[in-house]
Image (spheres, helix red, strand yellow):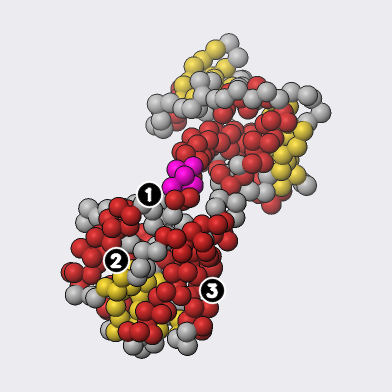
Amino acid sequence: MKVLLHACCGPCSLEPTRLFLEEGVDFAVDYTNPNIHPKEEYERRKEALIEYSLKPQGLDLIEGAYDVDAWEQQAGIYGTADRKARCRACYRLRFEQVAQHALEGGFDTICTTLTISPYQYTDIILEELERAAKTYGLKAEARDFSWCYDEATRRSIENGMYRQNYCGCRFSIAEAAAEREQRKRDIKLRKRLRRFERELADRCLEHKLRNQAEEHVSGSLALEITLADFKKLLGTDIADVHEALELIKNNRRLFEAEFSNVAFKAGEQPDAFVACIPQKDFAALCEAAPDSQFLADLIAFLQNNPHATCDEVVSFFAKRSRKYEASAGSEGLSIAFKNPDIDHHRFRFTFGPAQTTFIRTL
C-alpha cells in the first residue's frame, strides 16, 4: 500500500503522520486546500505543516493548485445557507484533486487528516474520500483520527505551532467567531444552571429528609419553582414563566446527565413552574445534592445518638466544615449551612426537646 495523505494543516497532521510512520506505511503528504482564505493564511498553514510535520520526519510534500475560482464555483456557491452542502462540495473538490495527484505519483491509496477535527463532518469526509477513490480506481484508507485530537492539541501547543481558529474558507471565519461567542455564553449559562440543578437536588433531598421512611417517590415528584427563585438562582432577569421554560428547553444540552429526564411545565400559579422528577431518577438526584453525604452522616448520628446533647451535636458539626453554623435558642439547637453561590441559608435543623424538625428556607 502506497498512501497519499491529504493534510489540512500542521497541527492536524502531527498524529496521523506519526501513526503512519510507526506502522511502516509508505506515504507522502498532499497539501491541496484552495478553500483556505486568505492566501496569507494558506501559506502560513503550509509553513507550519512543513516545519513541524514534514521536515522533522523527512516526508515529501505534494502541493495542489490554489484555485480559488474553482472552489467558489463548486463550494462557495452554497454560502452560509447550507453549511453541510458547502463542506461536502469542498471535501469533494479537494479529494478529487488528491486522487488525481495519487494517480500521477504512483500511489494506490488516499487518506486525509481532516477526520481528526471535532469541528468537521467526519461521516461526510469518509463518504467523499471513498467516492473520490472509487472514481479514480484507488483505495481509500478511511480512518477516523478523532481519537488523536487531544494528543495533537497537546503536542501542537507544546511545540508552539501556529493554530488557526477557523476551518479555512471565508464563510467559516464568521461562523467560527459566532461559535466561540456561543461557547462563551454557554459557559456562563452552564454555571448558572448548575445552581438551578443544585436547587432541584436539594429539594429532592428535602423530600427524602421530610419522609425518611420513603426511600423513593411513587410516580414522579413535582417540585414547584417560583419565578422569583429561578431568577435569583440564574442571576438574570426573566419576564415570565414562559420565558423561563423556553430558556430551559433551549439549553437542555447544558444540563448534567442525571437531570436529563426531569420534565418542566407551567404550574397552577402564574408565577411558578413545576419540575417533575421521575421515580427512577429520584435517588440519583438526592445524591447529587452538594451536602447529601453530610446530611446522611447527620441522620446516622442522630439515629445512633437519640439523646445527644446540644454540645455533642455542636461537636459533630465542629469536626466538619466551618461553613456550618450552630446556635442554641429557646426552641432548641439550630444548625444551618450556607450555599456559597447564593446568600441564604439552605437547610436548617432545629433540635427541640421532643423531636427533630426540619425547616428549609430560601
Residue 46 is left or right of residue 213, and the answer is left
Q: Quadrant of the C terminus?
A: top right
Q: Which residue type does callout 3 highlight?
A: Glu
Is residue 313 visible in this depiction of the protein?
Answer: no
Q: Which of labels 3 and 2 is toward the front?
A: 3
Residue 211 is left or right of residue 62, and the answer is right
Q: Which residue is mark 2?
A: 14
Q: Is residue 126 magenta?
A: no
Residue 2: numbered disc? none
Is label 1 in a helix, a strand or a loop? loop
Q: Residue drawn at (57%, 27%), measured in percent from left and top?
A: 233
Q: Classify mark 3: residues with Cα within 10 Å, few (<14), some (14-19) or many (20+).
A: some
Q: Earlier in the sequence, mark 3 or mark 1?
A: 3
Is residue 59 visible in this depiction of the protein?
Answer: yes
Q: Classify mark 2: residues with Cα within 10 Å, few (<14), some (14-19) or many (20+).
A: many
Q: Residue furthest top?
A: 330
Relative height, residue 177 to residue 11 (above, below): above
Q: Earlier in the sequence, mark 3 or mark 2?
A: 2
Q: Residue drawn at (54%, 59%), measured in percent from left and top?
A: 86
Q: Which residue is mark 3?
A: 127
Is label 2 in a helix, a strand or a loop? helix
Q: Which residue type does callout 1 highlight?
A: Asn
Measuring from the top left, give residue 288's x and y in whole percent. Answer: 55, 43
Q: Which of labels 1 and 2 is toward the front?
A: 1
Residue 165: numbered disc? 1
Q: Main secondary structure of the magenta part?
A: helix
| Residue closest to the eye, 181 or 336 | 181
Q: Which residues are magenta?
A: 173-178
Q: How many labels, in total?
A: 3
Is label 3 in a helix, a strand or a loop? helix
